[in-house]
Image (tube, helix red, strand yellow):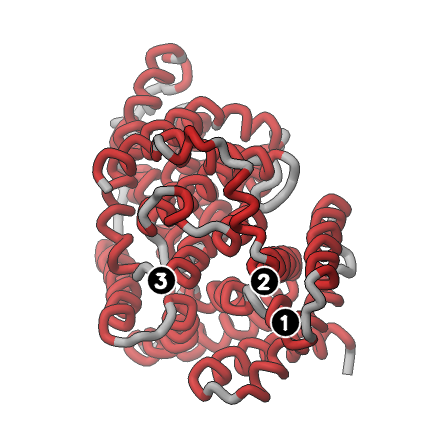
Amino acid sequence: MPFYHIRRLLIILFILTYLLSYFTAIPALAVLNGFILAFVLLQGFLGMPKVTKTVSLGLLVIGAMILFAIKASWLDWLAAIANNAGLVTLFLVVPILGMPFFYNDYEQELKNVARQNIGNILTFSLLIFLVAHLLGGIISVGAVALVYEIFIGSAREIKAEKLMRIAMIHGYVTTGFWSPTWASMAAVVSTQGVSWFTIIPYGFGLVLACLLLSFVYQRIKLARHPEWVFKPSRQEEIHINWSHILSLVLLIVSLLLAILLFDLFTNWQLLIIVSIVALLFPVGCALVMNKGPELKSGLAHYYRQNILKSKNEVVLFTVAGFLGKALELSGAGEYIVRFIPESLSRHPFLLIVFICILMVLFSLGGIHPVVTGSALLGALQPALLNLSTLEFSLAILLGWTAAILLSPFSAMNLILSGLTGEASWNISKKNALYGIVMIVMVAALITLFI
């Protein structure tokens, strides 16, 4: 059997053993799961980009040095390796979750809706924001290329490519304030003991604030660059299959409702809920919609393409969890707090901004926010910072979102760089003003209303 088939099967075995160990609480399964993840981690280093490999190896070495220094047992080492096993599982199953959104040709219908709305640039921009936001909440980073493909044709027709990109970026990144499929939300909920249901209303409130900020930002951009947009010379008759649009909306609503109901009526972790829903939702939709062949094709594509494509993220999530657990076992959190100026702990607004700046600065150096976020979540206790658990959770979500927006190494900016041919550094630089204002505004809202 070829080695790449063995790697795929091991990853599938890792997902299954993680879920089984959670529900059965059999220690042997948890140990087996840790060993499988360790093997997946080692093979994941093969063929990684140089920068990512260097950062990952560095974090692994630092974590190992800490564990050696505290004379950790082999079970502690295994626990450190498997610390982010839930996040790794979530990231691996999210592509399955998105399968029903390709059962029908929703992409073409969204293109038709876009073309129908190009006569009003602000309506067109709002549509892009909402579609990027909703799809980003379901299929995560996979939404970036899809939304770009949906809207770029209409945007080019009215010379609004730059405005389209702004709306798409703003819509996508703010998904991090509420989406259960994002690693940031899963990490916060699993470590802080706050439920997703508790965060949702605050998350949606922050999204509305960011939508308003995006609207103002775009109006200012249009006032300064009127050449960005030209009215189309004629409006052709466009037929839209509204039954497909309704089907798409029902899919999104039913998916979020399923996750919400599990969160309300079970004591399962959000990571487990989303992973279980990811495995069941495509099958249920295929049965209801009579899309058996599409389900089979989607699963085959997942096995051939998606599993091995995720190796960089699997390595980053694993080593971030490894370092975070090592810091937790060493009691480093109390020492880290000492490096935070005492004046900041007396001013929650400044402390939240400080946390965000810290996460952004590390991301500018190529360190994924999952690394910084996991380390902060594992090492710091909100009470020691004079923050409530909810304030600290939202601060991490804000910093994570800002890091994705502003880092030239984030998946979003790298994908956009490949699609547009523009350097990722330039893309992240253009996001800077909005990102800085977003940090200040959201930090102020968290301080005032939570």
Q: Please indicate whether residue 131 sits to the left or right of residue 208 in the image.
A: right
Residue carrying label 3: 193
Residue at x 43% of width, y 84% of height: 23
What crowding class fits label 2: few (fewer than 14 Cα within 10 Å), some (14-19), or many (20 or more)? some
Above or below — where is 353 with respect to 97?
above
Q: CA distance from mark 3 to mark 1?
A: 22 Å
Q: Where does residue 48 sit, x and y in percent of width and height?
A: 74, 54
What residue type is disc 1 on?
Asp
**Numbered mark located on residue 76 in the image:** 1
Name the element at disc 3: loop
Quadrant containing the N terminus in the rendered view: bottom right
- Residue at 42% over, 41% down: 173
Amino acid bearing label 2: Leu
Residue at the (55%, 69%) spot, across then down: 85
Quarter of the picture holding the C terminus: top left
Marks 2 & 1, CB-CB < 8 Å contact: yes
Q: Is residue 406 left or right of residue 212?
A: right
Q: Please determine whether, in this image, residue 390 is positioned above or below residue 289.
A: above
Q: Which residue is mark 2?
A: 329
Please name the residue shown 23% across and 75% down the image: 265
Q: Nearer the viewer, residue 342 or 141?
A: 342
Q: Earlier in the sequence, mark 3 or mark 2?
A: 3
The three-letter code of the residue at mark 3 reads: Gly
Q: Secondary structure at mark 2?
A: helix
User: Along the polypeptide, which appears first: circle 2 or circle 1?
Assistant: 1
- Using the numbered discs, state the Cα–Cα distance from disc 3 to disc 2 in whole angstroms: 19 Å
In this orientation, does residue 110 appear? no
User: Residue 230, image x and y in percent?
Assistant: 36, 19
Residue 427 picture location, percent across and down: 55, 29
**Is residue 74 at all visible to an observer of this figure?**
yes
**Residue lying farthest top?**
224
Among numbered discs 3 and 1, the one appearing first in the sequence? 1
